[in-house]
């Protein structure tokens, strides 16, 4: 396979641009891909003309100012897991406790990929949005009126995610330098953990990932890890809490790690200030510890950690810790280092 070859999921199907409101939760286990966002901006005028009304139609009746039975509805944009059922499961604890704490209804607006979520955020059609770090700055730099509530983390003591480089347990590769000339699986050119931060690491060693590696863009984290195990590539880059990795750790050797901003939740600044305060406080309150206290964490949402059993209350994360807007600036620095094409609009 040639340099930059893609096995799956590296292009945006023009027809996949609708947002579908769901009454209960949906989300993304992996850091959302952002290559689709870039491709969305390159759509032909005809496709763009088709996309806009589809987005508008799908959001009819979902205004945060609408009331159903006297209860205001908050629109929360997320990228789905592999199935609707999985997405609902990932956000069930959060949505039920959010409604309990605030007295507000919450409606998950599911998209088939991250591009419509970013577009809806820019258009002001969402009250809350969960996005990966690169998508956060992409939305802001294209006019989204949002403010950071916080970052999604796996434990209350954490502040960031990690990008990791993995090889098979029997591999002779011990670090980035050994990957020169090798087939390497990445996620997509706009993935923070799955390309941009690893690229910066290679460049620090004088290795140009566009020239000195055979980069294979897989499209999603779970498939990328499996592709490496299947022999499609000698190494893979993903995020450090990828369950495909952690649940099968004996099959891998970790040869590189770097700190990366986590995905996060942002809120529309166009909402009433008091409503913003109520929503933000609830988002920060609803975490794994709170869910345990409320007896709201079923066994399938729990896992063991170095600090004992934790509850995954918000998507696959423990919860949200507060962060400032400056939290996303590390992505801009990486873009300066890599000058990656995906960063051109950042």
Image (tube, rainbow, N blue to C red):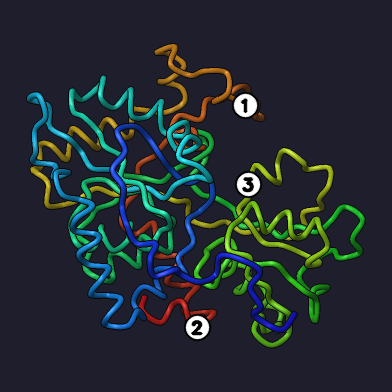
Circle 3 — which element? Answer: loop
In this view, the residue in front, 145 or 256, is 145
Circles 2 and 1: CB atoms closer than 8 Å: no
Q: Is residue 136 left or right of residue 74?
A: right
Whole-number angstrom distance, CA of label 2 to CA of label 1? 39 Å
Residue at 57 percent of width and 56 percent of height: 259
Q: Quadrant of residue 74?
A: top left
Name the residue carrying label 3. 242
**Residue 229 percent location from the top left of the image:** 80, 55
Location of residue 13 with respect to 297 vertically, above or below: below
Q: On the rendered image, what quadrant is the C terminus found in?
A: bottom left
**Residue 81 percent location from the top left of the image:** 50, 45
Whole-number angstrom distance, CA of label 3 to CA of label 2? 27 Å
Mark closer to the observer (2, 1): 1
Q: Is residue 85 left or right of residue 229?
A: left
Q: On the rendered image, what quadrant is the N terminus found in?
A: bottom right
Name the residue carrying label 1. 303
Name the residue carrying label 2. 339
Q: Earlier in the sequence, mark 3 or mark 2?
A: 3
């Amino acid at each position: 396979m040639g340099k930059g070859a893609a096995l799956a999921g590296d292009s945006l199907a023009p027809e996949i641009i609708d947002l579908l409101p769901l009454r209960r939760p949906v989300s993304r286990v992996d850091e959302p891909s952002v290559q689709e966002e870039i491709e969305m901006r390159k759509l032909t005028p005809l496709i763009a003309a088709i996309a806009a009304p589809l987005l508008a139609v799908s959001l009819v009746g979902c205004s945060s100012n609408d009331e159903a039975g006297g209860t205001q509805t908050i629109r929360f944009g997320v990228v789905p897991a592999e199935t609707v059922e999985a997405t609902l499961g990932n956000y069930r604890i959060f949505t039920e406790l959010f409604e309990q704490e605030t007295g507000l209804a919450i409606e998950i607006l599911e998209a088939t990929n991250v591009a419509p979520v970013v577009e809806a955020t820019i258009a002001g059609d969402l009250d809350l949005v969960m996005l990966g770090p690169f998508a956060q700055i992409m939305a802001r730099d294209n006019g989204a009126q949002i403010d950071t509530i916080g970052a999604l983390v796996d434990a209350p003591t954490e502040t960031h995610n990690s990008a990791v480089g993995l090889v098979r347990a029997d591999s002779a590769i011990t670090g980035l330098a050994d990957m020169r000339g090798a087939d390497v699986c990445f996620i997509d050119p706009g993935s923070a953990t799955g390309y941009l931060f690893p690229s910066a690491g290679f460049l620090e060693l004088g290795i140009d990932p566009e020239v000195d590696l055979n980069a294979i863009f897989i499209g999603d984290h779970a498939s990328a890890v499996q592709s490496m195990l299947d022999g499609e590539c000698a190494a893979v880059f993903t995020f450090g809490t990828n369950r495909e990795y952690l649940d099968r750790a004996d099959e891998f050797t970790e040869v590189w790690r770097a700190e990366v901003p986590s995905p996060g939740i942002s809120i529309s600044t166009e909402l009433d200030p008091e409503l913003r305060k109520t929503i933000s406080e609830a988002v920060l309150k609803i975490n794994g510890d709170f869910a345990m206290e409320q007896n709201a964490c079923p066994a399938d949402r729990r896992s063991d950690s170095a600090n004992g059993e934790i509850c995954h209350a918000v998507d696959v994360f423990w919860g949200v810790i507060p962060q400032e807007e400056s939290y996303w600036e590390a992505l801009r620095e990486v873009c300066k280092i890599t000058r990656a094409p995906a960063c051109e609009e950042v």
